[in-house]
Amino acid sequence: MTEIDWAKVPRRGGVYCMYDLDETPVYVGYASQSESRHLVSRLREHFTQQNSSVVAHGRIDLLDVWYVDIWTTQNWKLAEDQLIAAFDPVFNRGEPMPEVEPIDVDSPDETLSICNEEERRTRLKPSNRIRSKMDHIQRMVDSDQIALDALTRGEQDRIESARNAADYHLSILRKSIEDHYSTTESQ
């Protein structure tokens, strides 16, 4: 596994966009300017501690993340809305309409590699992706069952989010199965 270069990440407030192995934007998030909630600590929650809600509830499969684009800004909430509107990431809901655009979405301040190109190619092999997706979907179902059992009536957002995540991961699984067997047949 590639070692993440945390020294590249600014210890400031800002926003980030995670991309999957297919370069699809999957999640946009922000970090405030505070000493304990800057970009390094926020991204480490995702990739090292794995205790952010989007990871803990199985939405993001960390083995599917290729890289993260990072923008530093003091207007992190507006910038987050701007990125969501611009990129329509898989795991961010709603259609925010930012009043201003505090960052240039086409020019991130930094790009953090989560895996190198060789590791990406290995992860993209259909047989590897099938195993990874099946394992991830099982963990997601287990996590969601605990969460769904605890829900009270009227909390449909959580169910909808879980359904959308399952659809996303199942679409990757379906494509990987199709690729695997069409590759196998042609050999």
Image (spheres, rainbow, N blue to C red):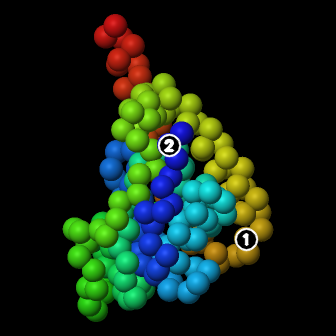
Quick check: can you spot residue 118? yes
Between 176 and 1, the one lying in front of the other is 1
- Numbered tag placed on residue 2 in the rendering: 2
Q: Is residue 44 left or right of residue 146?
A: left
Which residue is rendered at x = 58% and y = 84% of the image? Answer: 35
Which residue is rendered at x = 70% and y = 55% of the image? Answer: 143
Between 69 and 12, the one lying in front of the other is 12
Q: Quadrant of the C terminus?
A: top left
Q: Is residue 49 left or right of residue 187?
A: right
Q: Is residue 67 left or right of residue 40?
A: left
Q: Which residue is mark 1?
A: 151
Q: Residue furthest front?
A: 7
Q: Quadrant of the N terminus?
A: top right
Of labels 2 and 1, earlier in sequence is 2
* Residue type highlighted by circle 1: Leu
Q: Position of residue 128 (x, y in %)?
A: 50, 29
Q: Position of residue 161 (x, y in %)?
A: 54, 64
Q: Residues within 10 Å of mark 2 (few under 14, many from 20)?
A: few
* Residue type highlighted by circle 2: Thr
- Numbered tag placed on residue 139 in the rendering: none
Q: How many marks?
A: 2
Q: Nearer the viewer, mark 2 or mark 1?
A: 2
Which residue is rendered at x = 34% and y = 65% of the image? Answer: 110
Quick check: can you spot residue 162? no
